[in-house]
Image: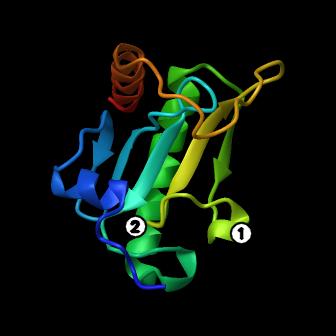
Amino acid sequence: MAYDDGNIFAKILRGEAPAFKVFEDDYSLAFMDVMPQVPGHTLVIPKDPTEDIFHANPVILGQTMATVQKVGEAVKKAFDVPGIMIAQLNGQAAGQTVFHLHFHLLPRSQGIELQMHAREMADFGELETHAARIKAAMA
């Protein structure tokens, strides 16, 4: 399958769709998931138009993973949790619904239930607050 530049993450990268941005550099962008599985659910995407991890430019992938590390630590701190679950899906059969490479950062601790993904939109005010907490944790 060829990369579809009409996907929502490509639109976010071009500024055609809104996002609650947490971090951005020359290689990657981190922002709040609008259909979070838990409070603080953050996404990290490469700026390179790639569908999955198997087609990613290794240099850009390495830079994107550095962002996953940096933002993951900030999410952990901002939400005061002992762990972060990192999920990355490749292909429809694996559950991928947006065909632009992305990493899910999910704050985890005992007793926090994961909600199903892509069921309902979160309150945008809450997402804005969560993004501010993560940014502050990176400062």
Q: Which residue is drawn at 52% across and 32% down?
A: 75
Residue ranking furthest to the right: 110
User: Which is more N-terminal, label 1 or label 2?
Assistant: 2
For residue 119, what is the image quadrant?
A: top right
**x and y percentages locating residue 55 in the rendered image:** 49, 84
Q: Residue at x 62, y 71 (%)?
A: 91
Amino acid on which disc 2 is placed: Gln
Answer few, some or many: residues within 10 Å of disc 1's Cα (few below 14, many 20 plus, some between 14 and 19): few
Q: Which of marks 2 and 1 is in front?
A: 1
* Image vertical order of residue 65 relative to residue 5, above or below: above
Position of residue 25 in the picture relative to residue 106 (left or right): left
Query: Which residue was labeled with disc 2?
Result: 63
Observer able to see residue 90: no
Q: Distance between the residues labelled 2 and 1?
A: 27 Å
Position of residue 110 in the picture relative to residue 137 (left or right): right
Q: Between 108 and 32, which is closer to the camera in this rendering?
A: 32
The quadrant the C terminus occupies is top left
Amino acid on which disc 1 is placed: Ala
Q: Which residue is drawn at 55% across and 32% down?
A: 36
Tag shown at residue 93:
1
Answer few, some or many: residues within 10 Å of disc 2's Cα (few below 14, many 20 plus, some between 14 and 19): some
Tag shown at residue 20:
none
Q: Is mark 2 on a helix, strand or loop?
A: helix
* Image vertical order of residue 54 relative to residue 109, above or below: below
Q: Between 112 and 90, which is closer to the camera in this rendering?
A: 90
**x and y percentages locating residue 138 in the rendered image:** 38, 32
Q: What element carries label 1?
A: helix
Position of residue 57 in the picture relative to residue 85 (left or right): left
Q: Between 83 and 19, which is closer to the camera in this rendering?
A: 19
**x and y percentages locating residue 72 in the rendered image:** 53, 42
